[in-house]
Image (tube, grey):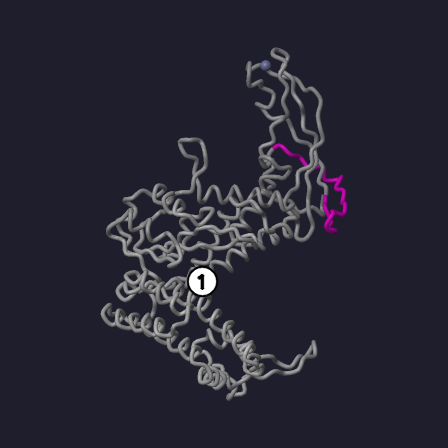
């Protein structure tokens, strides 16, 4: 026994047979030490739960329980588990093993270890690889962990999301696309903390109504603003349900609409027109300009300055040969050439700058003037995409102007789509939405820990 390191195993009743450790190679190619032993019959094991009589042993079955890894090597407990039979009522049962995790052939210690790794924010894949557990087992452990953190069993016997632990002054509602397809979910976020408060399938009003029912109307007493996209029905719900809440349309959504519905469409139309008129060179020049057109002028200026300073964006490879690449300049010049040659592109630029200026304003009267001016420019172009944007602004005027006094920014929403993709990937892309939603809720809290940014737009 001189070469044995011994420490408390916490496996009560299990007596390891030191002389018979068998080492096999697991499916993943790792060494797996089978620690065989005996599991002693404890008091209580033999008592019949139906008639309280003492049962006798009625056979046994060998059991393997995966246990905590020893460094990179796995361990498995192996022992005989007794079967009992009651001489009075004839009931049979298997010997209780308190250190076996419920529902899995693993020890409670291994389950706790996997749970703790998940709690630290490690991905499912990492936890599988560290513990040697299969993906479904890790998912089950994680699901239980998340249910414990974010849900409770209601009076109806079903699990429900916990109500938010605090009230807030502003929430944001947005929809994100999941599963690489046209499947949308509605997400409600506390803008003060960044915590996801609610997730629902679809992008319907019902998602909001369900949330209101979930938290209760009183919860909204402190909420002064709801930030959402203009192309949604959410505004109506909040206006119907609450008198004191102001719906605010933020810069992120305005720009998103402008870039997707106006800039992209105008550019495509112009390209088609130039091609039709035989101006192939100009059409070609427009082809790769989307990035330039949706960029802010300051961004282009920064890139040009980087080029002047000789910024190296790709370093010459040492271990893996690659040639050095310098930042390309003249982006602003290119942009200016584009808008000089094309009246509509010039208008795009004008509006982009005007929107930026309007959303910096903290004065409702000034912002009213700036937005009205934009509507004017759009209408005068006679172009259908600009006119569509003018109507969008007109129909949502109040909520846009409200930004001057309630300057909430939704930077947190911008990252949501990417976060969802990351969570899907790290969780093996499970198609179990309940799990995926809880995972998303969890990730919104994890990212908060080291990132206490203000929810107000910085000036
Ligand atoms: Zn009995």
| Magenta stretch bounds | 13-33
Q: Position of residue 65 (x, y in %)?
A: 66, 38
Residue labelled with disc 1: 414
Q: Is residue 238 left or right of residue 329?
A: left
Above/below status of 438 relative to 346: above
Q: Residue at x 27, y 70 (%)?
A: 367
Residue 442: x percent and y percent? 47, 51
The kind of secondary structure element at disc 1 is helix
Q: Identify the residue shown where x is 35% and y is 58%.
A: 227
Please state if 227 lies on the left or on the right of 26 as rendered: left
Specify the quarter for ligand 1.
top right
**Rendered location of residue 130, percent (x, y):** 63, 52
Question: Can I make out residue 255 in this image?
Answer: yes
The one of 356 and 338 positioned closer to us in this rendering:
338
Q: Is residue 185 left or right of residue 355?
A: right
Is residue 175 inside the magenta stretch? no
């Amino acid at each position: 026994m001189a070469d044995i390191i011994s420490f408390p195993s916490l496996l009560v009743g299990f007596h390891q047979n030191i002389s018979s450790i068998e080492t096999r190679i697991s499916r993943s190619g790792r060494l797996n030490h089978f620690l065989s032993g005996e599991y002693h019959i404890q008091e209580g094991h033999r008592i019949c739960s139906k008639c309280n009589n003492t049962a006798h042993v009625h056979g046994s079955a060998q059991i393997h329980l995966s246990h905590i890894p020893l460094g990179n090597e796995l361990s498995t407990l192996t022992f005989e588990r007794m079967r009992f039979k009651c001489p009075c009522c004839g009931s049979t049962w298997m010997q209780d093993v308190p250190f076996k995790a419920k529902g899995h052939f693993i020890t409670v210690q291994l389950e706790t270890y996997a749970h703790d790794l998940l709690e630290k924010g490690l991905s499912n894949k990492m936890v599988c690889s560290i513990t040697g557990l299969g993906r479904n087992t890790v998912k089950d452990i994680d699901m239980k962990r998340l249910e414990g953190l974010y849900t409770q069993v209601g009076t109806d016997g079903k699990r429900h999301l916990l109500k938010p632990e605090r009230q807030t002054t502003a929430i944001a509602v947005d929809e994100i696309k999941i599963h690489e397809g046209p499947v949308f979910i509605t997400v409600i976020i506390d803008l003060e903390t960044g915590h996801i408060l609610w997730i629902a399938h679809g992008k319907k009003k019902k998602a909001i109504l369900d949330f209101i029912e979930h938290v209760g109307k009183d919860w909204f007493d402190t909420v002064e603003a709801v930030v959402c996209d203009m192309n949604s029905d959410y505004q109506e719900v909040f206006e119907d349900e609450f008198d004191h809440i102001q719906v605010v349309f933020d810069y992120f959504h305005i720009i998103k609409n402008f870039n997707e519905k106006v800039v992209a469409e105008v550019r495509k139309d112009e390209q088609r027109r130039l091609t039709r008129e035989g101006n192939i060179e100009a059409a070609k020049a427009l082809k790769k300009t989307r990035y330039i057109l949706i960029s802010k002028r300051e961004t282009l200026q920064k890139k040009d300055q980087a080029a002047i300073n000789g910024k190296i964006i790709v370093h010459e490879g040492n271990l893996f040969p690659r040639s050095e690449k310098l930042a390309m300049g003249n982006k602003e010049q290119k942009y200016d050439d584009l808008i000089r040659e094309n009246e509509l592109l010039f208008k795009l630029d004008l509006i982009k700058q005007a929107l930026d200026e309007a959303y910096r304003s903290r004065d409702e009267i000034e912002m009213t003037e700036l937005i009205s001016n934009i509507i004017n420019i759009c209408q005068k172009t006679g172009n259908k995409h600009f006119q569509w944007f003018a109507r969008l602004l007109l129909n949502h005027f109040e909520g846009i102007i409200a930004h001057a006094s309630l300057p909430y920014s939704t930077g947190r929403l911008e990252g949501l789509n990417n976060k969802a993709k990351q969570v899907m990937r790290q969780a093996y892309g499970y198609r179990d939405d309940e799990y995926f939603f809880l995972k998303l809720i969890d990730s919104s809290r994890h990212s908060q820990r080291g990132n206490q940014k203000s929810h107000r737009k910085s000036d």
